[in-house]
Amino acid sequence: MNIKITYHIMPWEIDYALLSFTQLKKSKYYIPDDANITIDSVLNLSSHLINWEDSKLPKEYFIEKYNTLSILLNDYTHNTKIYTGNDLYGHLDLQRDCIEPDIDYYISICPDMYFSEHLLAYMVESVKSISSKYFVLTPQICRMWDESWEVLTHPKFAVGPHYGWERTTDIFDVDNHLHTASDPVSLVPIDQHKWAGWFDLYNKEFYENLVKIPEEWSGYGGWDSYGLIISNYAKHVGMDFQQYRLDGQIIFEYSVGPLRTDSICGFSNYYKNMLNRTDVSEQRETFNKNLDIYINKRIIELNDEK
């Protein structure tokens, strides 16, 4: 099987990428021989997003660090890209550009997410028993800020109130639990759908054909929200979609626990404070305003395809 992993890395996420790439290096020792894994990672140094002339750190600092930590992925086929153009570039561009004819499964990994070195191998083995035409596979998580996430929450880490969850969990407790508790790992179909592109696996039919990214999209936007609505509609009208939860494997943000400061993104603030960032919130707001239009257009297309 051929699997494509994608990473979209902003300069202030470079140290998170080091933590994540280290986990992928460890993961390689457990991946079965029949899995061919390619990684597409992009370091986004767009001048549309950052005024480099007025920043305290130059592009070259992040380029050197990215090239150095990429050595950790030499065991994989790793396609590196450093975007230094003047246009808006974001995760939507990467998600569309990563598509290849021979890929069977796509995995999106956020650089700031912790995952165990066993997770990737468990995912690879789990998909072998899934027969759904369209599917998403998602690990468990710790409690989040509202009840919609409870369908993914591991009972051990369903602690504290929904608001304030980030002060009741330590990501290193999660790591310790995964290495000492011996939870059984099992594949569970779930009826309430939820994912966020943190460390999710999508099969080819889902990623390329059911919830494909429109050509006109660029920059940033709620592809996960779009995908959730489209997939719920698809299931409602009888299409063979199913989300699965991988019980016994937990992912969550590194910024929970000792790497947290007063800001939820504390582990990256020391970079953010040295970069003159451009406010591009208008682009995301425009995407959100047009989300219903995108959804209705895709639903019409699905009906025509049927």
Image (cartoon, rainbow, N blue to C red):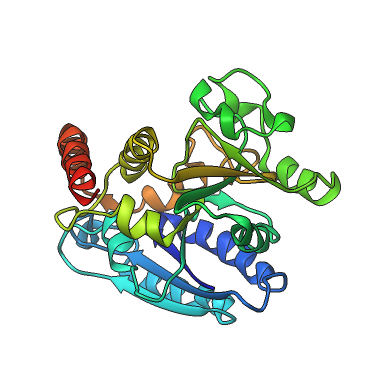
> Viewer-proximal residue, 84 or 215?
215
Residue 48 spot, x, y in % from top left? 18, 57
Q: Is residue 167 above or below residue 217?
A: above
Does 201 sit left or right of 142 as displayed?
Answer: left
Count of marks, rendered view: 0
Q: Quadrant of residue 82?
A: bottom left
Residue 21 seen anywhere in this rendered image of the structure: yes
> Residue at point 22% right, 51% down?
305
Quadrant of the snapshot with the N terminus: bottom right
> Residue at point 22% right, 38% down?
295
Residue 130 spot, x, y in % from top left? 58, 54
Q: Quadrant of residue 261?
A: top right
Residue 56 seen anywhere in this rendered image of the structure: no
> Residue at point 70% right, 60% down?
118
Q: Quadrant of residue 30?
A: bottom right
Residue 184 spot, x, y in % from top left? 79, 46
